[in-house]
Image (cartoon, rainbow, N blue to C red):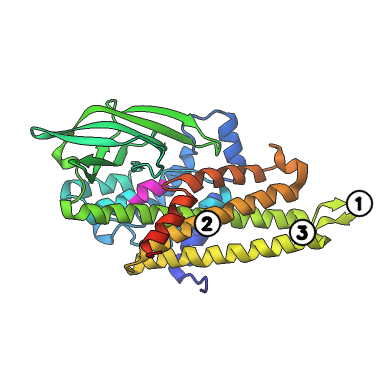
Amino acid sequence: MAYVLTEEQQMLSDSARDLFKAAPVALVRELRDQDNEVGYSQDLWKEMVEMGLNGLLVSEENGGMDFGWRGMGVILEECGRTLSNSPVLTTAVAAHIIDRYGSEEQKAMLTEIITGGKSITIALRSTSRMSADECIVTADGDHYLLSGTKQMVANANTADYILLSALSDGVEQYYLIENSDAVQVETERYMDSRMYSRLSFDSVKLSQSALVGVAKAQRAIATTLISGLNALLSAELLGLMTEAFERTVGYLKERRQFGVLIGSFQALQHRAADLYSEIELVKSIVIKALDALDDGDPIATAYCSMAKAKASKIAQLATNEGVQMYGGIGMTDDEEIGFFMKRARVAAEQFGSMSYHADRFARLSSY
């Protein structure tokens, strides 16, 4: 599959690349060393909002740019190259859900999300069989009562809204709520230097207008969320592994051992060639998944799980190889290659691990 962007997508890619030059990997180190409680550059986030990135998946009718999943994938790929953190992934996907399934009242919020910089985090049901976290919604007159917990919720410490899944009479439904004092947020910094939270809800009162979509749309919302989020995370992992690979090859061309460039060692050349081939495969799979979402392909969700499983595996391989080929210094904090390894590990677990998505792909494909 050819990696061909339309003229508009190429312009978007060029703009994103220029934007993220102001947020190199060194910024990740800086935010970590400062013990920054936000976890990302607020100046960068402001510029992303001004570019309209929160509205890339929103229809023009509701104030968005309607660039589609492939266009959004271009942004996440550039984020992966610089390890740039922001709420753009969850905010853009949540805005798409509101645009497509939300009530008129919820759609009225899109302006402040797209142009006002209001952010949304997404808290889904855990994909781990070992996790007991879940949220339950019960009717209470004209309101709902929300109770339960959610784990590993990205940027919840700064989010204005939360889009979450909860069980109502055993049926999974989706609610958009304000991130108010009624929500207990316990935040910690993970190994990728980003902030993740455990959310606790103790009979939090919700209005009926918090429900997103009608009953018959809930399954479609679930599929769109799990597919879209993982396709975009796969695009981020693609950018991450590509950058790690290019840095590693650059190092092989410069590092001398016993007076000889280590890039001349045939064993290292073979490893680099194998990795290049694997990255090209990931690129094709990610493009297929994003295009399938844009085209409304009935098996798009299977492609998205395939992309996440493959991207997670090869991102781990690419960063492992990078650290090993850098040698002893690659294991230290002096080199940036270790930051790519740490982000790859956490991103691979978000919204479903490699094993979960390999199994999901098999089940969806009737294996």
Answer above or below: position of 178 versus 51: above
- The residues bearing labels 2 and 3 have C-alpha atoms spaced at a distance of 22 Å
Amino acid at dot 2: Ala
Q: Secondary structure at mark 3?
A: helix
Question: Does the segment drawn in magenta span residue 345?
Answer: no
Under mark 3, the amino acid is Leu
Label at residue 345: none
For residue 206, which quarter of the picture? top left
Along the line of sight, the residue nearer the viewer: 25 or 177: 177
Q: Which residue is found at the position 68% from the left and 51% from the top?
A: 322
Name the residue rendered at 49%, 38% in the picture: 40
Residue type marked 1? Phe
Residue in front for this viewpoint, 58 or 7: 58
Residue at the spot 27% in from the left edge and 48% down from the top edge: 111
State left or right for residue 329 relative to residue 139: right
Extreme residue toward the right, this view? 259
Q: Secondary structure at mark 2?
A: helix
Would residue 191 be visible to someone looking at this image? yes
Q: Is residue 22 visible?
A: no
Distance (Cα) linking label 2 and label 1 = 36 Å
Residue 242 rendering spot, x and y as whole percentages? 60, 58
**10 Å neighbourhood of mark 3: few (<14), some, or many (≥20)?**
some
Disc 1 secondary structure class: loop
Residue placed under numbered mark 3 in the picture: 268
Mark 2 or mark 1, earlier in chain: 1
Residue 311: numbered disc: 2
Q: CA gap, disc 1 to disc 3? A: 16 Å
Vertical position of residue 143 compared to residue 115: above or below: above
> Dot 1 surroundings within 10 Å: few (below 14), some, or many (20 or more)?
few
Where is residue 335? Give x, y as percent. 70, 42
Residue span colored magenta = 88-93
